[in-house]
Amino acid sequence: MNAVVLARNSMLAMMLSLTTFSVQASSDGPSDAAKKYSPPANTTHATNVYWGDSHLHTGLSLDAGLFGNILGPDEAYRLARGEKITASSGIPVQLARPLDWMVVADHSDMMGIATDIKEGAPNILAEAKGREWHEGFVKGGQAAAEAAFDLIQNFSQMTVPEPLVKDYSPGSEVFTRVWKEIVDNAEHHNEPGLFTAFIGYEWTSVPKGFNLHRNVIFRDNADKALMVDPATTQPPTGSTNPKSLYKWLEDYESKTGGRVFAFAHNGNLSNGWMFPTEKTYHGGVVDKQYVTQRARWEPHYEITQIKGDGETHPSLSPDDEFADYENWAVGNLDLSELKTPAMLKGEYGREALKLGLQLEKKFGVNPYKFGVGGATDSHTALATADEDNFFGKSTSVEPSKDRISHPFVESELGEIPGYTLVASGYTGIWAHENTRTALFDAMERKETYATTGPRMTVRFFGGWDFKEQDITASNSVDIGYAKGVPMGGDLQKTRGKKAPVFMVQASMDPLSGTLDRAQVIKGWMDAKGKTHERVYDVAVSDGRKIDKSGRCKQPVGNTVDLETATWSNSIGAGQLSAVWTDPDFDPKESAFYYVRVLEIPTPRWVLYDKVRLGAELPEAAELVAQERAYTSAIWYSPK
């Protein structure tokens, strides 16, 4: 018996000794191998795509409020986060899926005037124009819309009565109060890891109707954002010259130690002034200082939105059969000047990327080396970019049987028809977490892409050593970062390689159409300084063939039922991928590459209006379109 007890005690002592040894070993920390056991805990790679709208207006904006928008930032964020709310028109509205982030970008100019016009504040009624705008709003309907458009015209032509400009400029009580309301709402709805509410605003430069707008986005929280008043454009405190905005951005960072950048939108309404190469609208010149400042402060561009798609135009890309997508080429923003062919070159994103190569050769800096995103620019406080859930540009054209008949803008020179409004778009940001810091940094490094609404997943890597098997590897994303650079990056030196190799991966949005094709768009500059472009189909669906010229000439087909506004995903592909080598590479030529992914044809919002509301459509209305995604480019320089 004693022997058994002794044996048991001996075994217990040995076990305790082992336990003590184990605890002692763990106190020294895990081994190097153990530290690397959990990959997600040890990577800074952008592992997730986060969807958002970088450009939304609420009733606090001077035009949106007068159009009848009674919703503020709180309602805008609640909708974006997945709640069902009631639109200003009284219609219940909800997104099919919540967004991950958003920027409420109300106009910085005349902050607070819309509310006071609606309420008939004494200072508003003291001015003849103010009374006119107030009376139009009270009448409602078309009268309110006309009053809002008149306000926009006076704003763009800088004929708003001076006393009203002063009452709603930086330093005034109303301006400061409204800015604080915007910032406080962003703080309230910002939940790191769950939803990012960026602090931001729109700097609305529109001299003589030429759209030179920029949105401003902060990396920071309220403590820094409230140390300043937003930049404005109306004199005497503001200026429409982008250089004044660059100075404001520089002063903000110097004063607060924070971070901020700006991005432009709707070059298609600038009548050639958005991407200058020689002279700027304000009488300046495109010199080393200009290109350096623009490259520093504008790392991003809004390439698609409700007022037209801004990738390219058929006149600029005659060999691209998909270039004629939702183009707006009538004139400037208020149609006070019509478009001429010569203006197009300074308006579209693809052409700007080409112009940037020429300016880089001249000055050593590329001012148009931007990443891309999409946004709604809705003035309804509703970030609705789905074709079957489109609430229009403004409250006056929220869903109704006759909204299609209302022109977006009309002047003595012409009109932009209401049925040409675009249910676009969203931005996908590749980042490792959903926070202001991570998303802002991703936008600065250009690891972003735009879609016209659908949430398709797109990856794009460029390097020199990718192999066919890399695209199908379980760790293909890790390989992409290890061997190359992601969208928005710069290819390293050739290291003796013949041509760059790219990995393209695209997956359909499960709530949208399947994929027709994935394309690489290349732009380059030859030895004489002339720029060129070419479209390559790199992956196509349904067993179609890509010919020796790099194109698939066979259309994917069309399954849209015009009677029911439905379609079938019986054609197209759920996923497309390719490892593609540039067959025309010249290591002496600067170049850029980006990916465009096309869905199969699906119904436009006007067809849903016809089927659901009984809307009568004009013959010119496009009923079907191929929605798409555009990635930020990857650049190559012989340097």
Image (tube, rainbow, N blue to C red):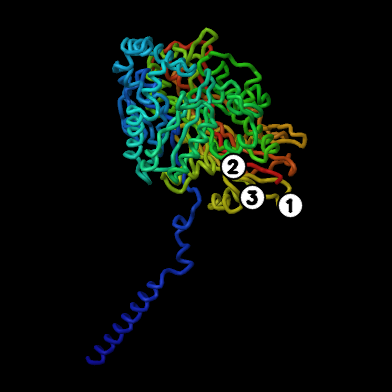
* Residue to which mark 2 is pinned: 504
* Residue to which mark 3 is pinned: 466
In this rendering, does residue 614 appear at all? no
| N-terminal-most mark, 2 or 3 | 3
Q: Nearer the viewer, mark 3 or mark 1?
A: 1
Circle 2: residue type: Val
- Which class describes the residues within 10 Å of circle 1: few (<14), some (14-19), or many (20+)? few
Determine the secondary structure under disc 2: strand
Q: Position of residue 51 (x, y in %)?
A: 44, 38
Q: CA distance from mark 2 to mark 1?
A: 23 Å
Determine the secondary structure under disc 3: loop
Which one is nearer the viewer's eye here, 46 or 95?
A: 46
Circle number at residue 100: none
Which one is nearer the viewer's eye here, 222 or 408?
A: 222
In this rendering, does residue 240 appear at all? yes
Q: Badges 3 and 1: C-beta atoms under 8 Å apart?
A: no
Q: CA distance from mark 3 to mark 1?
A: 15 Å
Q: CA distance from mark 2 to mark 3?
A: 11 Å
Relative side of 48 to 128, left or right? right
313 lies above or below 18: above
Circle 3: residue type: Phe
622 lies above or below 431: above
- Which class describes the residues within 10 Å of circle 2: few (<14), some (14-19), or many (20+)? many
Q: Badges 2 and 3: C-beta atoms under 8 Å apart?
A: no
Circle number at residue 496: 1
- Which class describes the residues within 10 Å of circle 3: few (<14), some (14-19), or many (20+)? many
